[in-house]
Amino acid sequence: MPEEVVKERFDRLLALVHEKASAACSRFEGQTLPVLVEEKNRSEGLLTGRLGSNLLVHFPGPPELIGQIVPVFLKECKGFYYLGEISEER
């Protein structure tokens, strides 16, 4: 099979996967949900945690929260993860 055909098919498949993942992920956007804080993110000042559905959430917070479940407002879906902020609803 020619390489350009393989690349074109792969790109179409990747676009479809991203579209479906984004649709599935975005259903929680704008909600405050409990997040298990797992680790410090590579980006300075961010933590990474998971929703009960196993989706990743990145949000600012202190490393002392690692291991805790905290309410996070899910501001923006990025396809395969959310950007959020800790909610005052503790």
Image (cartoon, grey):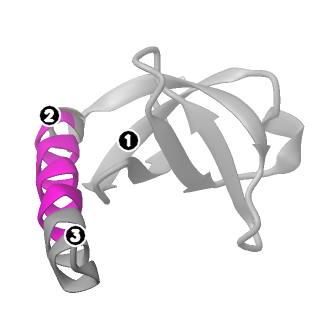
Nearer to us of marks 3 and 2 is 3
Which residue occupies 23% across, 60% down? 14
Identity, as a three-letter code, of the amino acid under mark 2 = Arg
Q: Please name the residue shown 28% across and 54% down the image.
A: 79
Name the residue that disc number 1 marks: 73
Question: What is the three-letter code of the residue carrying label 1?
Answer: Phe
x, y percentage for residue 90?
A: 54, 23
Where does residue 48 sit, x and y in percent of width and height? Answer: 65, 46
> How crowded is the residue under tag 2: few (<14 C-alpha within 10 Å), some, or many (20+)?
few
Disc number lying in front (1 or 3): 3
> Would residue 87 be seen by someone viewing this image from the given angle?
no
Q: Which residues are magenta?
A: 11-24
Instruction: Please give the name of the residue rendered at 25% of the width and 76% of the height, measured from the top-left corner.
Output: 7
The disc placed on residue 1 is: 3
Near mark 3 (Cα within 10 A), the count class, few <14, some 14-19 or many ≥20, is few
Can residue 16 be seen here? yes
C-alpha span from label 1 to label 2: 13 Å
Q: Tell whether 21 sits left or right of 73.
A: left
